[in-house]
Image (spheres, rainbow, N blue to C red):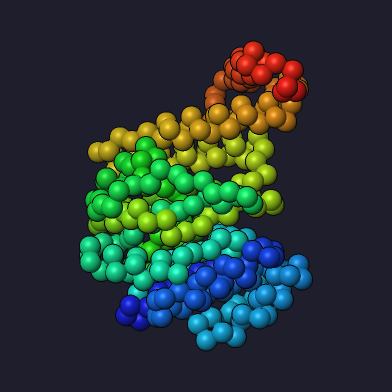
Amino acid sequence: MKYKRNTVSVIIPVYNTGIYLEKCLNSVIESDYKDIDIILINDGSKDDITLKILDKYKNYSKVRYFSNENMGISLSRNFGLDRVDGEYLMFVDSDDYIEKDMISKMVNRIIKDKTDMVQASFYVEYEHYKLRRVRPKNDVLSKDEMLKALMKNMGVNNYLWGKLYRSEIFEDIRFNKDYKGFEDVEIMPKIFMKLNSASLMKNRFYHYIQRRGSYTNHMNLKIASDMYDSFRKQEEYINNHRSNLSVSNVENYYRSEMMMLYIMMVDKLSDEELREFKYPQYDDENVWLIFKMARGIMKTIVKLKYGKRVVL
């Protein structure tokens, strides 16, 4: 396919993100990089605020607007990928926003380094404060180095956003329509397999907004278990396609299981609920007893430290 040289296609699927959407769109439209093509996709939004904002921005000169019945995030992203015509592309979630110089500096970097992808750093933003995750140093990594770093959570992340890609990478890559939740974890190794090399930038260009109602902010035991299973499948995919690496996703398994324990405590799940829950990542049907014991140990530690101030 022939792409428009130096143009950046920005894919923004939208589903009921309400008041967050306008800040997102303004941040992209007001970018200091002028050659941008915003692919704005209404994925069946119903709330009035979202629809009013979409109506306001759909005729902007930099925007190509599409309105569909609800398809879900994977098919909406595929819809956007089918319409990319820029030499480069990036994804922005419609409740997040970017810095004004993000696109220009990332384009400059991908050209300077002659790489296939650039990853920037980000803020995690809550209502009243920001978190600054450990960020990587400015670097250029090979394909195998990127895959190893992904498995170790060392400077390379599973987020689709916050990255600039050469569009040709996605010519034969699409999101799995049957994958519900953690779509980024499923597709990221497929993207990395297409790289010759990638650049890392320590600049915090992307603002990852934590809002009520988003998928990862109403975590339950099923979602945490699905997260573990996604990392397991990711590890299998990499080892099947790059057997020389022999990677392990142990860091992410640990985080997933800690999340499961946290949910068991906070949600005050009964022994019966723990017994009935299916743990797809384990063969032993009695694994719930291990989680029960671990939860008991965590409760004891919390009680010893905080006493009656914490109700478990």
**Placement of 90 over or under 213, stated as above or below:** below
Q: Residue at x 55, y 29 (%)?
A: 257
288 sits left or right of 80 in the view: right
224, 135: nearer the viewer: 135
Q: Residue at x 60, y 37 (%)?
A: 224
Q: Quadrant of residue 18?
A: bottom right
Percent x, y for residue 10? 47, 71
The C terminus is located in which quarter? Answer: top right
**Placement of 26 over or under 197, stated as above or below:** below
Q: Residue at x 40, y 69 (%)?
A: 101
> How many numbered dots are placed on residues in this image?
0
The N terminus is located in which quarter? Answer: bottom left
Percent x, y for residue 11? 50, 69
Q: Quadrant of residue 273?
A: top right
Percent x, y for residue 61? 52, 86
193, 96: nearer the viewer: 96
1, 113: nearer the viewer: 113
Q: Is residue 180 visible?
A: no
Q: Residue at x 59, y 64 (%)?
A: 94
Name, please, the residue furthest toward the front. 128
**Placement of 37 over or under 173, stated as above or below:** below
Q: Is residue 256 visible?
A: yes
114 sits left or right of 167 in the view: left
**Placement of 281 over or under 95, stated as above or below:** above
Percent x, y for residue 81? 47, 69
232 sits left or right of 40 in the view: left
